Structures are given as structure tokens and as C-alpha cells.
Amino acid sequence: MEHKWLRLYVDNVWTGREDRMVRINGQEHSIDDLAKHHGIELPDSKKTKKQVNSNEDIRYKDESGDDSDSGDGVSESTE
């Protein structure tokens, strides 16, 4: 199924409204939300990276006991 709003991409550049909204059946929708809903990756999609609080993550890892690394930097050989 072709989505008509995808035609507003010319050479992988969005040429539609600046706010990236389209009107479908009288309702306005964000093209980013539509693409996500339909499993479409947009050429200029704003990919969000998970922000990591490394200190908090390390503390959680230490407290949970899931850390399999002994932290001494020495590997034991089984030769």
C-alpha cells in the first residue's frame, strides 16, 4: 500500500509542511508517528538514542549482581 504523504519526499528530503504534519481524512497526523505506526523508516527520521546515565547504570549493575566481569582485567586460561 502506497502512502500518499510519502510523495512529499523529493530526493529523500521532506518538502511538506515545516511541522511535518499531514491531513488524512480531516485529521492531522505527524509523519513521524505515521511512519512508526506503519513500520516505515523515513530518510530524514529523527532517531532518538537512549540516553544513558552511566553512573546510575553502573551502580544498578553492581547492586543487581548481574556483572559477570570480575573487574581485575585478568582472564583465566583453561589451557
Image (cartoon, rainbow, N blue to C red):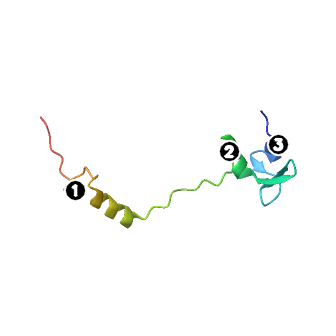
Dot 3 alpha-carbon crowd within 10 angstroms: few under 14, some 14 to 19, many 20 or more: few
Residue occupying the point 27% across, 53% down: 67
Q: Earlier in the sequence, mark 3 or mark 2?
A: 3
- Nearest the eye: 7 or 2: 2
- Nearest the eye: 63 or 76: 63
* Helix, strand or loop at mark 3: helix
Residue occupying the point 37% across, 61% down: 57
Q: Look at the numbered discs 1 and 3 and tell me whether their residues touch, using CB distance below 8 Å.
A: no
Residue occupying the point 65% across, 41% down: 39
- Numbered label attached to residue 7: 3
Residue of label 2: 37
5 sits left or right of 49 in the view: right
Residue of label 1: 71
> In the image, residue 36 lies at what x, y percent?
66, 46
Q: CA distance from mark 3 to mark 2?
A: 18 Å
* Helix, strand or loop at mark 1: loop
Type of amino acid at the residue the image marks with label 2: His
> In the image, residue 40 lies at what x, y percent?
68, 41
Quarter in which the C terminus is drawn: top left
> In the image, residue 18 lies at what x, y percent?
80, 60
Q: Look at the numbered discs 2 and 1 and tell me whether their residues touch, using CB distance below 8 Å.
A: no
**Farthest residue, direction bottom:** 55
Dividing the picture into quadrants, the one containing residue 48 is: bottom right
